């Protein structure tokens, strides 16, 4: 009876971890699940060799809550994807996820927001300045703002 419960405990745990890995591509998800499954099998075998009363249960409890474990893997996967990508939304999503992990993550999030926000503000200011001068030039060309040349030479 115990063997049947043990046989279903590990696959059930892996199913719960898999459910928490939304947003990761299938190949990466399978790699993560294979890594966790391999670790669990090794730990169960080790505990059986030590004569532990319920090796599967002990191995599963050592990994903790499957949703928390999936969240850790998801955070790491998104951080890796963010390091490879320079797309603003990918980086900001990764930084936002890190911000929820603690003070260090929040600091990285603020640096990311500043790193992308400051150039955007500067570009907007540059476009406004260029637009202002273009508008002033257009006024002068049609005679609305006057021109020093016209006034000086009575043209």
Image (cartoon, helix red, strand yellow):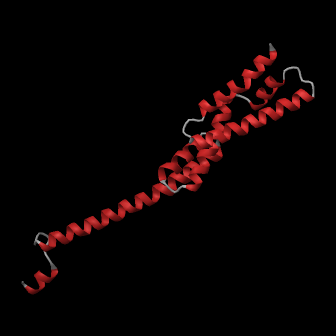
Q: Residue drawn at (64%, 39%), measured in percent from left and top?
A: 30
Q: Nearer the viewer, residue 68 or 115?
A: 68
- Percent position of residue 44, x then y: 83, 29
Which residue is nearer to you in this view: 135 or 24? 24
Find the residue positioned furthest to the left: 155
Does 81 sit left or right of 10 as displayed?
Answer: left
* Residue at 59%, 54% in the rendered image: 83
Q: In the picture, which quadrant includes the N terminus?
A: top right
Q: Which quadrant is home to the C terminus?
A: bottom left
Q: How many numbered discs?
A: 0
Q: Can residue 101 be seen in this view?
A: no
Q: Where in the figure is residue 107, as x and y percent of width and height?
A: 60, 49
- Residue 58 at what x, y percent from top left? 82, 25
Does residue 104 lie above or below 12 as drawn?
below
On the picture, is 133 further left or further right than 75? left
| Res. 146 image quadrant | bottom left
Q: Residue at the right extreme?
A: 50
Residue 66 in which image quadrant: top right
Tell me the residue at 84%/24% (across/down): 55
Q: Which residue lies furthest to the top in this view?
A: 1
Q: Residue at x 88, y 20 (%)?
A: 53
Q: In this view, does 67 lie to the left or right of 134?
A: right
| Drawn side of residue 150 relative to residue 61, left or right | left
Residue reaching furthest bottom?
Answer: 153
Say which of 3 and 62 sits in front.
Answer: 3
Q: Position of residue 16 (x, y in %)?
A: 64, 27
Q: Is residue 28 visible?
A: yes
């Amino acid at each position: 009876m115990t063997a049947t419960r043990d046989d279903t405990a590990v696959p059930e745990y892996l199913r719960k971890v898999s459910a928490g890995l939304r947003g990761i591509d299938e190949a990466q998800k399978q790699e993560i699940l294979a890594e966790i499954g391999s670790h669990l099998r090794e730990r169960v075998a080790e505990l059986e060799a030590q004569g532990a009363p319920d090796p599967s249960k002990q191995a599963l409890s050592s990994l903790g809550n499957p949703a928390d474990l999936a969240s850790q893997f998801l955070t790491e996967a998104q951080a890796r994807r963010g390091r490879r990508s320079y797309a603003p939304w990918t980086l900001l999503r990764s930084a936002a996820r890190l911000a929820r992990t603690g003070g260090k993550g929040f600091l990285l999030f603020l640096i990311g927001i500043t790193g992308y926000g400051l150039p955007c503000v500067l570009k907007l200011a540059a476009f406004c300045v260029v637009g202002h001068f273009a508008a002033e030039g257009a006024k002068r060309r049609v005679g609305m703002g006057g021109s020093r040349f016209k006034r000086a030479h009575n043209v």
